[in-house]
Amino acid sequence: MTDQLIIFDTTMRDGEQSPGASMTREEKVRIGRQLERLRVDVIEAGFPAASPGDFESVKAVAAVIKDSIVCGLARAQENDIRRTGEAIASAVAGRIHTFIATSPIHMEKKLRMTPEQVLDAAVKAVTLARSYTDDVEFSCEDAVRSDPDFMCRVIEAVIKAGARTINIPDTVGYAIPFQYGALIESLISRVPNSHRAIFSVHCHNDLGLAVANSLAAVLGGARQVECTINGLGERAGNAALEEIVMALKTRRDVFDLDTRIDTTQIVPASRLVSTITGFPVQPNKAVVGANAFAHESGIHPDGVLKHRETYEIMRAEDVGWNANKLVLGKHSGRSAFKARLAELGIDLGSEVAINAAFQRFKELADKKHEIFDEDLHAIVSEELTEPQNEHYALLSLMAHSETGEQPQARLVIASGGVEQLTQSSGSGPVDATFKAIENVVMSGAELQLYSVNNITSGTESQGEVTVRLSRGGRIVNGLGADTDIVVASAKAYLSALNKLEARVERVSPQV
Ligand code: KIV
Ligand code: ZN
């Protein structure tokens, strides 16, 4: 047993499976670089067999990351494993993570396979994966509802076939901490060759217990935890990386384990993932929520001022709350702008793209004077929207609201390269703007979510708007940022429409 806990981040794979959270290749490279700065041990970058786009994204992440293992997910099927092996081929350190369900309900109803067939497929998958890399992880999907005796047989066989990490996922978020911890402990003690593998856990948050279950498993002997930034993930999400890491650090007396994580990169990672996916972080979210270190009740600030540890168990600066330094201003030149992008690990790919982003930066600096890292990420997110995916674009907008009058919006938008003037009234300027866009586009999409967040603080800040649209079972998130929130809203709505226009065929790993 080691005193090191391996942190495996699956924001770009399981996190991406949240409806509307899909990421482009460029977005994955940016998140990958931030995860590397955060010093996660393993970055699960995607599911290469899901689509050509997923394959290219994993390949791109594998090509740039030097200090973390880059991993791809594969079902226990030959084609998936070969695609994943090819996608991670250029990584300095690459891992194939293959899985098959071991619970009776999944084997019978989903896979329509007998337990013996599942055992055979698992061994074949691991053997084939080992022909691409020495670093192979195997997961018993739906482990918590599986028969432990059967799992012991599967685990022993896949370790013999070369799996170096064994993951015991709580796929449906059904586990209770003390039972899950005991399950991990008993599997480790019962599987005869368990000492040749690291045991890992991967918990979903359907009962709000993902972090508690993961920590119980660590006490039971697990030495890898799979988790995501902001707890993003299928349905109610996965265990939140920031909570796991800070629990281990703050309660070292209980866990006595180290991680490699640079905790000061936690808040920047949280912000970046939220900006890119359009999933806002709730204010009272542990560690990364805006209120996580705010003391407002009167009694608390007094205590904190007298002696900080009266009410604070962690320091805000230790998780990166001060990391959003003022970086640039109105008078900053192109080289300072370019240097800061490089420090943030942002590669725009060409001088033309840097010029266009610099132009946006200058326009923003004119409006808000102080530019923070978060502002740069928002500018870059817009700049990196691939032009071929931009069917609709905002050219100009005029919105009018006055007490006692109906709000109005008049816009010029480009639709497939053709300029169109459109206008509408609405219950407010944002409603009027969306109605005006729909007068032209007639998308038939349903608005599922509209939210506005301050990117930084103060009324000068850019508002970052998320618009979630659904149509024909597809859900997309559009993002827009501007110091004018009506403009940000129009950009977000058009960005969501552009995503709906782009045809993306993906296979879910759960199939
Ligand atoms: O939840 C799950 O079981 C998974 C596996 C593919 C590890 O995401
Ligand atoms: Zn999962």
Image (cartoon, rainbow, N blue to C red):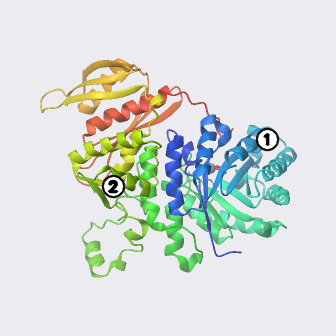
Q: Position of residue 103 (x, y in %)?
A: 75, 49
Q: Position of residue 448 (x, y in %)?
A: 42, 34
Residue bearing mark 1: 78
On whether ligand 1 comes within 8 Å of the CB at mark 1, the answer is no
Q: What type is the residue that disc 2 sits on?
A: Ala
Residue 143 visible in rendering? yes
- The structure residue drawn at horizontal position 41% and vertical position 74%, both measured from the top left corner, is 313
Question: Is residue 335 rendered to the left or right of residue 184?
Answer: left
- Residue 207 in the image, given as x and y percentages of width and height: 55, 54
- Residue at the (48%, 55%) spot, across then down: 230
Task: Name the residue at 73% across, 49% down.
Answer: 98
Residue 170 in percent (x, y) is at 65, 54
**Viewer-closest of 174 and 359:** 359
Closer to the camera, 313 or 395?
A: 395
Residue in the foreground of this view, choosing between 83 and 294: 83
Q: Is mark 2 within 8 Å of ligand 2?
A: no
Q: Which mark is residue 336?
A: 2
As shown in the figure, which amino acid type bears the numbered disc 1?
Glu
First-in-chain label (1 vs 2): 1
Is residue 279 something one can see in this rendering?
no
Say whether residue 369 is left or right of residue 52.
left
CA gap, disc 1 and disc 2: 49 Å
